[in-house]
Image: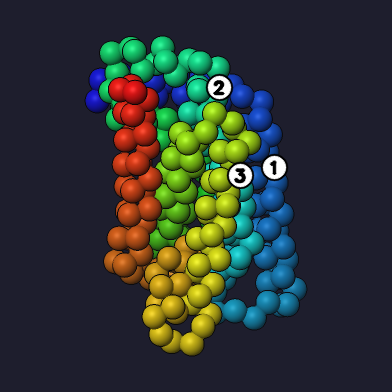
């Protein structure tokens, strides 16, 4: 993929020097810290009754863990292509000796790195709890695997929607609505056993996170996560190629 590394460096630099990015990071970490504090305080006060500990609940046992990701990924990806198209720099980029695949994957990886960097400080929560009690590292690792897989899929969707419009706001809204639609589809798993229930369970990211936070890895979840990454990126590459030729 010609031009991948230079574009990746440029994208990472543009992400980490943007004031909005640091505001989003600060708000995200404040929210996660507050969420974790509430869970620990609830367990300390013996107000929580659960088979899982506070760390497992934090990493996927509650809906409060999942909801911020619905807003986080659209914000991280909304500038990827829409800003290039609005400012007119996409033409210069596409006439450079780079491939559309390199452009798409560089932007995707930059946003994904930003997503992972935002989650890294939460690893301190496992270290804190390990000093005062037992922490099963296997469940911690599988829980963070679900976070990575979810981010990979949601960032891919955000990159795709950013390529469909020249407006950052529209890109964020379309991405957010797409992720919300997936979330609403997952609610079908609350229905009685049947086809709709199975579909809802299969597409449910929250159920995947809940399972992974207990150390349970289902191969069906891995297949769905891979599909959620590959299909949006495939369509994004095709979209960028259409700009070059037409």
Using a 10 Å C-alpha cutoff, classify the residue at mark 2 as few (fewer than 14 neighbours), some (14 to 19) or many (20 or more): some
Mark 1 vs mark 2, foreground winner is 2
Using a 10 Å C-alpha cutoff, classify the residue at mark 3 as few (fewer than 14 neighbours), some (14 to 19) or many (20 or more): some
Looking at the image, residue 26 lies above or below residue 198? above
Q: Residue at x 60, y 67 (%)?
A: 62
From the image, tell me which residue sits under label 2: 86
Residue 17 placement: quadrant = top right
Where residue 46 appears, as percent x and y from the top left, is: 71, 77
From the image, tell me which residue sits under label 1: 27
Find the residue positioned furthest to the front.
246
Q: Earlier in the sequence, mark 3 or mark 2?
A: 2
Left or right: 94 as drawn, with respect to 213: left
Where residue 168 appears, as percent x and y from the top left, is: 59, 32
Where residue 71 appears, as percent x and y from the top left, is: 61, 48
For mark 2, give the secondary structure: helix
Question: Which one is nearer the viewer's eye here, 196 or 230?
Answer: 196
Q: Residue at x 46, y 24 (%)?
A: 11
Q: Which mark is residue 173?
A: 3
Q: Residue at x 44, y 78 (%)?
A: 196
> What count of labels does the image hold?
3
Looking at the image, what colour scheme do you see? rainbow
Query: Mark 3 and mark 1 in contact (Cβ < 8 Å)?
Result: no
Query: Mark 2 and mark 1 in contact (Cβ < 8 Å)?
Result: no
């Amino acid at each position: 993929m010609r031009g991948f590394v230079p574009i990746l460096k440029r994208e990472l630099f543009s992400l980490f020097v943007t004031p909005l990015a640091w505001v989003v990071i600060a708000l995200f970490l404040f929210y996660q810290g507050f969420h974790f504090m509430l869970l620990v305080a609830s367990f300390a006060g013996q107000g929580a009754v659960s088979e899982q500990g506070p760390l497992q609940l934090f990493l996927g046992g509650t809906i409060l863990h999942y909801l911020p990701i619905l807003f986080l990924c659209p914000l991280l990806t909304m500038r990827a292509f829409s800003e290039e198209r609005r400012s007119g720099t996409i033409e210069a980029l596409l006439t450079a000796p780079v491939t559309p695949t390199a452009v798409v994957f560089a932007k995707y990886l930059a946003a994904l790195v930003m997503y992972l960097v935002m989650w890294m400080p939460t690893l301190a929560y496992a270290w804190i709890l390990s000093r005062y009690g037992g922490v099963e590292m296997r469940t911690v690792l599988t829980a963070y695997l679900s976070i990575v897989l979810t981010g990979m899929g949601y960032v891919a969707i955000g990159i795709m929607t950013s390529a469909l419009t020249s407006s950052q706001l529209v890109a964020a809204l379309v991405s957010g609505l797409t992720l919300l639609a997936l979330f609403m589809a997952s609610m079908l798993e609350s229905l009685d056993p049947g086809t709709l229930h199975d579909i809802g369970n299969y597409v449910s990211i929250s159920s995947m996170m809940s399972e992974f936070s207990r150390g349970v890895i289902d191969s069906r979840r891995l297949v769905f996560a891979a599909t959620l990454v590959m299909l949006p990126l495939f369509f994004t590459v095709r979209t960028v190629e259409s700009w070059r030729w037409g």
